[in-house]
Image (cartoon, rainbow, N blue to C red):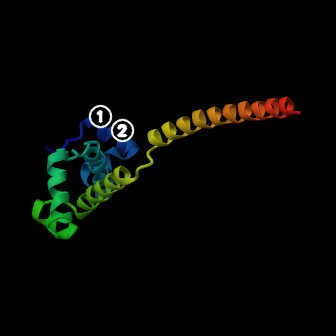
Amino acid sequence: MDHICTSEQIRFWAGSNLQHAIAGLNRCFAAKMLTRCSMSKKRQRREFTDEFKNDAVKLVTEQGYSCSEVATRLGLHHTNVSRWVRQARNQIENKAIPGSSQDLEAEVKRLRKENKRLLMEREILKKAAAFFANESK
């Protein structure tokens, strides 16, 4: 449904040129007024379910169709399908990398604990070696 300008909006946009805008003498200005009034209406974004996106990605990755071909068949723009495929590949790569941040933090914590234990054992062995060396003299 198109938005119709009210007389107040016409007066606001026309200013002192109200007579010319209404009479149609300044058609360019009248077109601008109507464009401004109709542009206030926001465009609805289409939302797609995750299942739909996954099915589109599978057509590209498993079936071998191109992104443009899948987009055309599904009535979408090719950039949508390309973005979904790229996001899916990034997710797979992130899962494939064994060193996620939580894994790395746990590994660092374990290694620090082990390092502390080994340093303590080394100090004990040094003291024991010094003790037995003094006792044998």
Q: Nearer the viewer, residue 89 or 126?
A: 126
Task: Work out which quarter of the rendered image holds the N terminus and state it.
Answer: top left
Residue beneath label 2, please? Answer: 12
Kindly report the distance in space between the C-alpha atoms of the residues bearing marks 1 and 2. Answer: 6 Å
Q: Which residue is drawn at 29% across and 34% down?
A: 8
53 displayed left or right of 126: left
Residue 58: where, in percent of width, then height?
17, 59
Marking on residue 8: 1
The answer to which of 102 and 18 lies nearer the viewer is: 102
Provide residue 76's location: percent of width, then percent of height.
Answer: 17, 59
Q: In this view, does 2 lie to the left or right of 114?
A: left
Examine the rendered structure and indicate whether residue 127 appears above or below residue 24.
above
At label 2, the amino acid type is Phe
Report the residue that reaches farthest toward the front.
136
- Name which residue type carries label 1: Glu
Task: Please tell me which residue is depicted at 86% across the width and 31% down the height of the picture.
Answer: 134
Q: Is residue 25 visible?
A: no
Query: Picture quarter containing residue 12?
Result: top left
- The residue located at (33%, 44%) in the rendering is 18
| CA neighbours of label 1 inside 10 A, class few (<14), some (14 to 19), many (20+) | few
> Residue drawn at (21%, 64%), measured in percent from left and top?
61
Q: Quarter holding the C terminus?
A: top right
Q: Residue farthest to the right?
A: 137
Which disc number belongs to residue 98? none
Whether label 1 touches label 2, CB < 8 Å = yes
Foreground residue, 54 or 16?
54
